[in-house]
Amino acid sequence: MRRRRATGDVIESLGRALLSIRRADHRSAEPASSARLAPILVAGLTGFAGLAAAIRTKPVQALDREIMARLQRMDHPQMERAMRFVSWFGFPPQSRVLPITYAAVLWVARFRLEAVFQLLAWGTALLSTIIKSFMARPRPIAGRDLRIVAVPLGGSSMPSGHVLTYVGVYGWMAYMADRLIGPPVLRRLAVAVLGTLIAAIGPSRVHLGHHWPTDVAASYLLGSSYLAAMVVAYRRLKARRVPG
């Protein structure tokens, strides 16, 4: 029992040493910062609604095929491996284990509110499932101009569950890294790696033939709105906890 408690104390100490709150993050800056996120939230939702309407009426199909065909012509073996690697995080079982692990690390390090929000960021996966049931868009089919990398897929092509989940889960991780990691070099490296993962997942899904480009674009827009709403909610709750 003592050994287990000692191990937990060590993990907590290491976590808090690495995730040391930056002094620049004080309550007085929160309201102004949150207000700047409102346009992102509105623009994301508006853009998503517009693309969803266009997808339902099918005026974007020709454009989708052209973009996908051009992207798939870049078929260098190294690029193929990179695209597969980027998408790997979004397939089960890792897609179900990793988000819980990320939240658990924050929880053990005593960042309890941040851990709860990390789980809420995973809510983008549920949001994707709900929207898929309404959209019911067929996925790309292999043909003359398109190729499909075989993986177990199901459901609607729109939205892209990978993209939506990455923006939520890894977008929140990037925000936490920028907010909590003390050493500047480590902080910038973490944000850069997570940002690259988010930016690359969209092209990955199209290059592998699993989604249409407009699926990906719509998912980025909706995911950005979801993430912006989370940051606003988190900042408001955090401001109430921090003494003036």
Image (cartoon, rainbow, N blue to C red):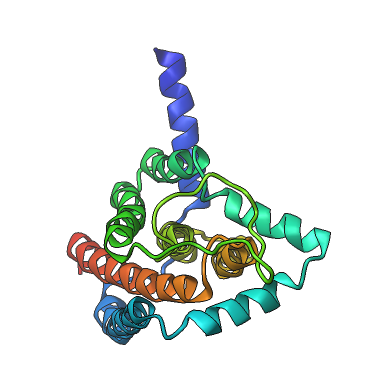
In the rendered image, is residue 203 in sight? yes
Asked whether, in this view, residue 233 is left or right of residue 71, the answer is left
What's the residue at 27%, 57% (across, down)? 130
Give the quarter of the image for residue 74: bottom right
Which quadrant of the view contains residue 243? Answer: bottom left
Residue extending farthest top: 1
Q: Is residue 82 left or right of residue 127?
A: right
Q: Is residue 103 left or right of residue 202?
A: left
> Measured from the top left, where is residue 120 in percent x and y?
30, 53
Residue 218 sits above or below residue 179 on the image: below
Q: Residue at x 48, y 43 (%)?
A: 98
Q: Nearer the viewer, residue 191 or 170?
A: 170
Whether residue 192 is visible: no
Q: Nearer the viewer, residue 183 or 143?
A: 143
Quadrant that contains the N terminus: top left
Instruction: Pick out the residue farthest to the front.
Output: 144
Residue 142 position within the rendered picture, expressed as x and y whole percent measured from the top left: 62, 61
Kindly identify the residue that appears in the image at 28 percent across and 79 percent down: 34
Q: Position of residue 198 (x, y in %)?
A: 54, 65
Quadrant in the picture for the C terminus: bottom left
Q: Residue at x 39, y 65 (%)?
A: 137
Asked whether 138 or 111 is in front, the reply is 138
Residue 125: image quadrant is bottom left
- The outermost residue toward the left is 240
Viewer-nearest residue: 91 or 157? 157
